Image (cartoon, rainbow, N blue to C red):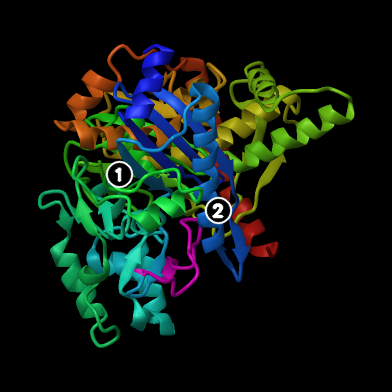
Amino acid sequence: MGEANKQKAIASGKTALGIEFGSTRIKAVLIGEDNLLLASGSCEWENRHTGGIWTYTLEDIEHGLQSAYRALADDVEKTYQIQLTKVGAIGISAMMHGYIACDEKGNLLAPFYTWRNNTAAEAAELLSEAFRYHIPARWSVAHLYRAILKNEPHVQKIAHLSTLAVYIHHRLTGKWAAGIGEASGMFPVDPQTKRYDAGMLETFARLTAGKVPYALEDILPEILLAGAPAGELTIEGARLLDPTGTLQAGIPLCPPEGDAGTGMVATNAVKVRTGNVSAGTSVFAMIVLEKPLKRPYPEIDLVTTPVGDLVGMVHCNNCTSELNAWVELFGQFAKELGASLSKEELYGLLYRVSRKGEKDCGGLLAYNYVSNEHVTGVEHGRPMFVRTEDAHFDLANFMRCELYAAFGALKVGCDILLKEEGVALDRITGHGGIFKTEGVAQNYLAAALAAPVTVMKTAGEGGAWGMAILANFMLQGGDLSDFLEKKVFCGQEGTTVFPDPEEVKGFAAFAERYKAGLSVVRTAASALKG
């Protein structure tokens, strides 16, 4: 599409806008009818650890939404010399799970609990036992049950139980709705009926009888499948998104999805026997299953694709935060030496240095646990680097070790799916900023999973692009997997790396050391108070 055609598409509203709230960055992406990028904008934000919980304030949410959109609109005006007054459709995505409790008017009744919180661990265990189904501590229902068990006064007033994506969607449309993938991370969904699991709803009703004045199904958002209309941008919603008043109301919105669902879309991994790994502040692997697992596993979540097919999910709370901290430290050192390196140059340099390291990291060991890590049973964030006296400590081994550690907990969980359950996997695709430096993290992930890993040229666009695609899908319709194959990824460039046998052995050796040292990091979590 030439520049003139792009300008025409923007002016006529033949576009789709996707906005995704990640843990450290909010990104907005505008695409055309061909699903190719037209413009983007982003802003950084950071969660707060306040009163013992990981949270963002309402002001953080509103400011972040407006800042990311403003950056996008500015990019449009600068690139195409045109103001952004309308788009064809909008989609909202955010990090999944967590807890937002609202009254009838949509007012927050309690602080927003993000997915990083482990405060509902005890409640999650009780629900898992009652449901005979694994309920992670970060799921919305676990947070609700914890609040009910603690007799927190606000639970009596709840009219709407929400996630961040659902809440923002409501603010823009007035409608409480969730894409099925997002809903499946709030409360278990039945893949056959595409509704909240009826039997588990009944069990929850028995557990909470006389404790709350509502049925859970009455406060959960409506489930919608990808492609369904999910409301329109209201006048109030348009002013929230764009306080300048330039953006018009009346724009249709698609169902809000979590970052897991947008990751599946952005990597063309919604078919059975396909999978993806989304790596950012957290990391998760999603594999679309042919059949249910033999039994529940605390390390494996069961969620769905945006059209409701069952997915085995290994979700790890930690991935790049500690890695980023080390890169920033080396950047400060470089600055002291008078070196002027951009972030991209610094990351590229250090990542490529890691390729010179030994396949097993020379005996070095690291844990990237900035927050708790449920997959490995570590209750508090205690980042750690440790080595024996005879380990080979140099920069290449150190950087390789930190990159391996980014996938350490993920390997523990994925080994259950791929080895113990024998889940079949035809292809897996990686996306997220960690894959931007070609042939580094991609090779390490292939070694961790002992499977080929593909990274598309769009890997850095991530979930905001996936959300924009879902908005386009609502406008164009059809079957989602066919839509992705024929209208999004047909002709897309990508690279596939196959696992190097020696690197697989090296990562396996690191993984054994990683598992053996978990008692050390658990002790640190207990002994060193945060």
User: In the rendered image, which quarter contains the C terminus?
Assistant: bottom right
Could you tell me the amino acid type at mark 1? Answer: Ile
Residue 123 falls within the magenta-colored stretch: yes
Q: Residue furthest bottom?
A: 210
Q: Residue beneath label 1, please?
A: 251
Q: Is residue 363 above or below residue 212?
A: above
Residue 247 falls within the magenta-colored stretch: no
Could you tell me the amino acid type at mark 2? Answer: His
- Mark 1, residues whose alpha carbon is within 10 Å: few (<14), some, or many (≥20)? some
- Mark 2, residues whose alpha carbon is within 10 Å: few (<14), some, or many (≥20)? some
Q: Residue beneath label 2, please?
A: 63
Q: Is residue 344 above or below residue 100?
A: above
Q: CA distance from mark 2 to mark 1?
A: 21 Å
Residue 375 rendering spot, x and y as whole percentages:
45, 50
Q: Which residues are magenta?
A: 106-125
As drawn, is 323 to the left or to the right of 273?
right
Residue 141 rendering spot, x and y as whole percentages:
33, 66
What residue do we see at 19% from left, 41% from top?
A: 307
**Residue 67's image quarter?**
top right
Q: What secondary structure predominates along the stretch shown in magenta?
A: loop
